[in-house]
Amino acid sequence: MSKDFIQSAGLKLAILAVLFVALPLLLVSLDKGYIYQVVMLALIFSLLAVSLQLVTGIAGLLHLGHAAFYGVGAYIAALAGADYGIGFTLGLPLAGLGAAAIAFVVALPTMRLVSIYFAVATLGIGQMIFLVLQNWVEVTKGPNGVSLFSGIDLFGYTVDSELGIYFVVATIVCISIWVIHRLSHSYYGNALRSLREDDQCADAMGINTVRLKIESFMISSFFAGIAGALWAYTTGYISPVDFDFAESILILAMVVVGGLGSIPGAIIGALLLILLPEALRGVGDMRNIIVGFVLFFSILFLPKGLFGEVPSLNFIRRQFGSAWQDNPDKQKVGWK
Amino acid sequence: MIDPYYLQQLTIGISLGMVYALMAIGFTLIFGVLNVVNFAHGEVYTIGAFAGIMAIAAFGPPFLVIVFIVLAVGALAGFSLERVAFRPFRRFSDEASLKSRAMREATLMSSLAMSIIAREAMELLFGSEFQTIDIGYLINKPISLGPVTIVNGDIIIFVVSVLMLGGLQWLLKYSAIGLSIRAVSNNPLGAKYVGINTDRTIVLTFVIGSMMGALAGILVGLYYGAVFPSMGFIPGVKAFVAMVMGGLSSIPGAVIAALVLGVAESLSTTFVSSVWADMVAYLFLIVTLVFFPQGLFGARRERV
């Protein structure tokens, strides 16, 4: 017991230490706005990739419009902040709930579609949301985008230094990823995996497949909306081109490159696809072409991704999952 | 009597629809033989347009020569696309793995990756703005037919598309190649057993589909005078919508759906506004998927 405990706590502590001590120290010592932007972009895209992983990797629904829900969250947070004076504390949950509500409306008719039909429906819906963001000028201000000048207000304190914003973003991203992690490694997550493997069989076993699909789609969109709100508050300016089809593909590429079904994989994929193009910025603006090549070669040579689901599940069992082990102190997992 | 203005819009709609039909056929043929969606089809369209304007810039050939150059480039693009993005994932040739989900998703992603690479490479080479085209080659010279004014491009697009569609029908119905394409799309394993070279048939399907896509690209490029690296995305999506509406494997269905889509789009440009015209295609897509998941002309499918 003790060894596993140290292992598990050790790894969690190491990640938290890097995120909340080492990285901020590095950022302060470098003190460049550009580096802050890259780090926060990487954090936000990690959350986006993990939230897409829940739908695409774990529940097996190929979703080609994730960036649109990210955009909905960003626009709700930015418009609430800029036009109605609603601050971060209320704007953040509002962004998530708004994205989830739209996902619910969209999911009701489309969720009985399967495979490629579902993928195409999400592509169409993503494009429709994008068109609304771009052309409903009275509300979204169209292609000019929305500027948001207020800092992050947290229960009376206003955070507007870059370091402060970094801490807020890192905390929210960590909590969200933790929630998705717990969700996907529970009975609920296993039910979602059963949809991916064979939804007709899952239906026959008594799982309410349509309801589960709608729920996972809503949860995923909720976190995409949260990520959007964080993006709006970190950059202070959003425009529709941040949420077009290319962004959906970028997020999907992160999930595929990291490994479908694996949450650590999605984070690795997000870090790779954000940091690699930034590292190669000297060569020219190659971001999208790098995404294309990385996606292609990873499908060709690593069809299971950099950190696939099976290694990921084994890893989680080893590191975190005392419930799977013979342990008299804990309640066992399994059928009684 | 109908206002001539609406007749004019109707002509534009039919031209648009014909172009979507040319593209949708590429999708439909490929979906027929492989049961996969070729997401790089929009880039074949762009490549066709770029090949055409480069030929014009280099030696200014007559229009018919441009058409043949574009067809050749389209064939080459289709051939290489199949080699790079589809063949590596067809490791097993039994029917179960040919139609498996893993194979469908892998090729979908690889064609998506290829489309990103092609588009970004063109953007690096040519820049992302509109290319300059010799004015003499644009097919938008007005022609008056009584009260209605159309442009010569409407006639050219109509004639070229009808010729291509007729040629395709002839090819599919009466030639050995067409017979093998129909056989493979009906039953890949059975086709293999009776001695049809399925790999060669699949390559030929890509070549034929991409020739049509590339031709659509140059026709639209010269019609609107707008050729740029990301021009293929929206027509690609619309052709895809036409394919879904037509029932995925039905060529006449795809053509009719494409015409409906083109006319609906030009009418919505007239009555609503041009920025919302793209919405019509997506609405059609969702409505089709929700209410007629088999498409309007498709054969019955077990599940969609």
Image (cartoon, coloured by chain):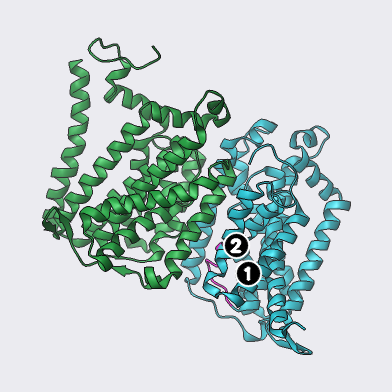
Q: Nearer the viewer, residue B281 or A241?
A: B281
Instruction: Look at the numbered disc 1 and give the secondary structure of its residue.
Output: helix
Which amino acid, mark 1? Glu
Nearer to me, B30 or A287 = B30
Q: Nearer the viewer, residue B70 or A35?
A: A35
Tell whether A39 sits left or right of B89.
left
Q: Are marks 1 and 2 in contact (CB under 8 Å)?
A: yes
Residue occupying image coordinates x 52% and y 72%? B275
Residue occupying image coordinates x 36% and y 66%: A239
Label 1 marks a residue whose chain is: B
What secondary structure prevails in the magenta region? loop
Marks 1 and 2, how far apart at CA: 7 Å
Q: Is residue A302 visible?
A: no
Specify the colour of chain B: cyan
Which shade is chain A?
Answer: green
Identify which amino acid the numbered label 2 is placed on: Ala
Residue A183, how many percent across, how many down?
Answer: 34, 33
Which stretch did the figure color magenta?
Answer: B226-233
Say which quadrant the C terminus of chain B sits in.
top right
**In this figure, which residue is indicated by the disc labeled 1?**
B265
> Which residue is identified by label 2?
B281
Give the image quarter of residue B187. top right
Identify the mark at residue B300; answer none if there is no mark: none
Q: Earlier in the sequence, mark 1 or mark 2?
A: 1
